[in-house]
Image: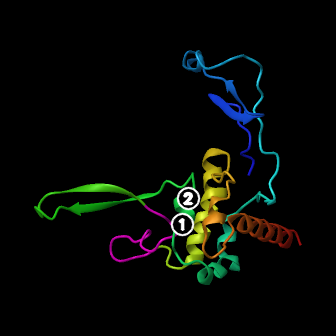
């Protein structure tokens, strides 16, 4: 997903050959590490160069892909557990809950509770309406939010490519595979439009 390197960091710490190497970019670290460093040397952080999964990040996404039939398969595959969202380092959605204490029903608190776009009830609104009832609609929202909507607003994809969602899914739904399928659909739509 293009997130394996960053130029703005405070420190890089890694263990190589039984020694701890620290690349110090933040001046405050010098005082902290003064008594622990045995020698100073130039350190260049190592980065992950490749993984065993290849992802074709789609370019030129249009909202026409929302009507694609590719999302329908998730109606039966996804079980709405929300585990993919709860392990994602970039998912930050929440909802509010009113908690009433049992000792005094007139006293309580309003809590911000972590929520998930993949779980039933997340898109419920006043009047009993539900914006995304089917699992395919929820998957479409999650995917397009991470690679289209967020990129439109900030200039880069929200997904960092860590693969936690792929590892935790009890139904073996791969986000990386979904992104690749989206790339295929977008390429097909672009090619059909040129004819």
Asked which quadrant contains residue 129, the reply is bottom left
Q: Residue furthest front?
A: 18
Residue at 55% of width from left, 15% of height from top?
Answer: 31
Within-10-Å neighbours for mark 1: few <14, some 14–19, many 20+: some
Task: Indicate whether residue 15 is drawn in magenta.
Answer: no
Residue 151 as seen in the image, left or right of residue 193: left
Q: Which residue is mark 2?
A: 87
- Residue shown at the point (33%, 71%) measured from the top left: 126
Asked whether 126 falls inside the magenta stretch, the response is yes
Residue 137 in which image quadrant: bottom right
Q: Is residue 167 left or right of residue 2?
A: left
Q: Which residue is mark 1?
A: 83
Q: Residue 75 at x, y = what percent? A: 59, 81
Give x and y (percent) for residue 3: 71, 45
The span shown in magenta is 115-130
Residue 110: quarter of image: bottom left
Q: Are marks 2 and 1 in contact (CB under 8 Å)?
A: yes
Q: Residues under labels 2 and 1: Cα distance? A: 6 Å
Above or below, 42 against 64 in this view is above
Q: Residue at x 56, y 77 (%)?
A: 135
Q: Secondary structure at mark 2?
A: helix
> Quadrant of the image for the C terminus?
bottom right
Can residue 148 be seen here? no
């Amino acid at each position: 997903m293009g997130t394996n390197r960053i130029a703005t960091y405070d420190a890089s710490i890694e263990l190589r050959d039984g020694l701890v190497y620290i690349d110090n970019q933040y001046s405050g670290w010098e005082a902290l590490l003064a008594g622990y460093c045995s020698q100073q040397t130039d350190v260049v952080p190592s980065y992950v160069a490749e993984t065993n999964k290849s992802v074709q990040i789609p370019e030129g996404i249009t909202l026409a892909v929302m009507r694609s039939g590719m999302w329908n398969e998730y109606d039966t595959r996804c079980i709405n557990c929300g585990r993919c969202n709860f392990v994602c380092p970039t998912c930050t959605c929440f909802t509010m809950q009113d908690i009433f204490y049992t000792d005094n029903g007139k006293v309580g608190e309003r809590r911000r509770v972590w929520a998930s776009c993949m779980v039933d009830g997340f898109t419920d609104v006043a009047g009993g309406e539900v914006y995304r009832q089917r699992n395919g609609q929820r998957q479409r929202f999650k995917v397009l939010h991470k690679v289209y909507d967020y990129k439109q607003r900030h200039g880069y994809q929200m997904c960092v490519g860590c693969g936690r969602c792929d590892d935790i899914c009890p139904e073996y739904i791969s986000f990386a595979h979904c992104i690749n399928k989206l790339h295929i659909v977008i390429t097909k739509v672009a090619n059909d439009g040129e004819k």
